Image (cartoon, grey):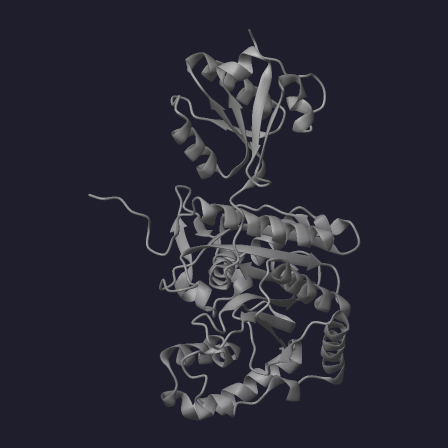
Amino acid sequence: MKVTKIKGTLDFYQSDAKKYRYLQKIASGVAESFGFREMITPIFEATEVFVRSVGEGSDIVNKEMYTFIDRGDRSITLRPEGTAPVTRAFVENKLYAVPGIHKYYYFGPMFRYERPQAGRLRQFTQFGVEAFGGEHPYLDADIINLNYQILQALGIKNIKVLINSIGSGLAREKYVEALKKHFEPHLSALCDDCKQRFQKNTLRMLDCKVDSQNPVMQSAPIISDYLPDEDLQYFQDVMSALTLYGIPFEKSDRLVRGLDYYTNTVFEIVYDDEKSPLNNLALSAGGRYNSLTREFDGPDYPAMGFAMGVERLMMVMDELGITVSETNDDSVTVITLGEEMKKQGLLLTQFLRLKGKTAEIDYQSHNLKPQFKLADRMGSRYIVIIGLDEFVNNQIRIKDTKEKTEKLIPVQELTTFFGIEGEKYAYQK
């Protein structure tokens, strides 16, 4: 029987693997420039971590989690999202003991049992950030700003930033009651998901894709009519700060988040190109969650964060023709002529690797053509050639594939050429 990858998963290799790591590098670099540090958590947690935080009425808990009973009779779940594990780690390790705002970012695989389609996978990767300890409109705006700047750094300009405030506490309860009163007489005209959400997660009905144009949905109450003055002012201050940053946005009264822990500010960034089949594809989303630490028996610690779908970003980069250079500006392929020179090539390759350079050699071929093919396949910028003449004359030939130049230099100058400090290199004779 032919063995293939599991449905809803992907293999990354060659240019895709390079793009995947490039995304990680760019996102991490921008996050670190905003003062965030990396946090790494396990890919599986006690199921209760997600039931407590994400919410029993959410689609994730009801339909999408990969859950199993281990040999210790414990219910274990492969993480479907990153905020709950990071919050659990924040509380468990008492990181809140140090006053101030704590900023963390993460990158890694998540798992949801979804119907595979474009942009939806069963194993997918998220880059996300969480900022614990601050509740201020400027922080909310700066988190959205960070998300926006990562997309700009990746070259993804065709985006739309949607924001809303979904309130909290008593105001939220009153709004949910108003939604129930509005939807209840019309449930028979709505989809099955909406009927289920009506009982357990009424707010999520506004996120329905099937009935989004239904007049019943279009005429639903909007939450801003139920927010107290202080919440409305807070949200206004968030929008003013975004304007200060020069970030275009749209206020979206129907925008909600699918996870129960969100409060007040929420946002989503979607791909914006009406001519593209990827138009309105959600690239990232997030918001404020002011009580999640309590779910893990920690102190009240307001927080704000977001998560980005890495595979979705890769799809958009492909559509926009954004490529990651296959040429490694620091890499070297060593080419040799003859069996005796192959040994010299092995020694030089070892020397370069120990000095921190990426170096490759064809172990068996003595012909030039397959060795040059190796250099091309590896994306090497430099090709170092050792033939009998070079060896006898203590010289070495270096081709720069980027600058399209070729030099014949004394072998002792090889270290200077590659910026290697310390000992000079010499052939072993």
At 29% from the left edge and 47% from the top edge, which residue is drawn? Answer: 4
Q: Residue furthest right?
A: 99
Q: Position of residue 55 (x, y in %)?
A: 51, 66
Q: Which quadrant is the C terminus positioned in?
A: top right
Residue 52, picture quadrant: bottom right
88 over 161 or under it: above or below: above
Q: Is residue 305 visible?
A: no
Residue drawn at x 72%, y 69% as measured from the top left: 141
**Would residue 356 be seen by someone viewing this image from the given angle?**
yes
Q: Is residue 260 above or below residue 178?
A: above
Whether residue 342 is situated above or below residue 188 in the rendered picture:
above
Q: Residue 353 sits in which quadrant?
A: top right
Q: Position of residue 228 (x, y in %)?
A: 72, 84
Q: Position of residue 153 (x, y in %)?
A: 64, 58
Front-lying residue, 143 or 87:
143
Residue at 53% of width from left, 89% of height from top?
220
Please provide percent x and percent y for residue 365: 38, 23
Residue nearer the viewer, 426 or 41: 426
For the N terminus, the image quarter is top left
Q: Quadrant of residue 198?
A: bottom left
Q: Residue furthest top?
A: 429
Q: How many marks?
A: 0
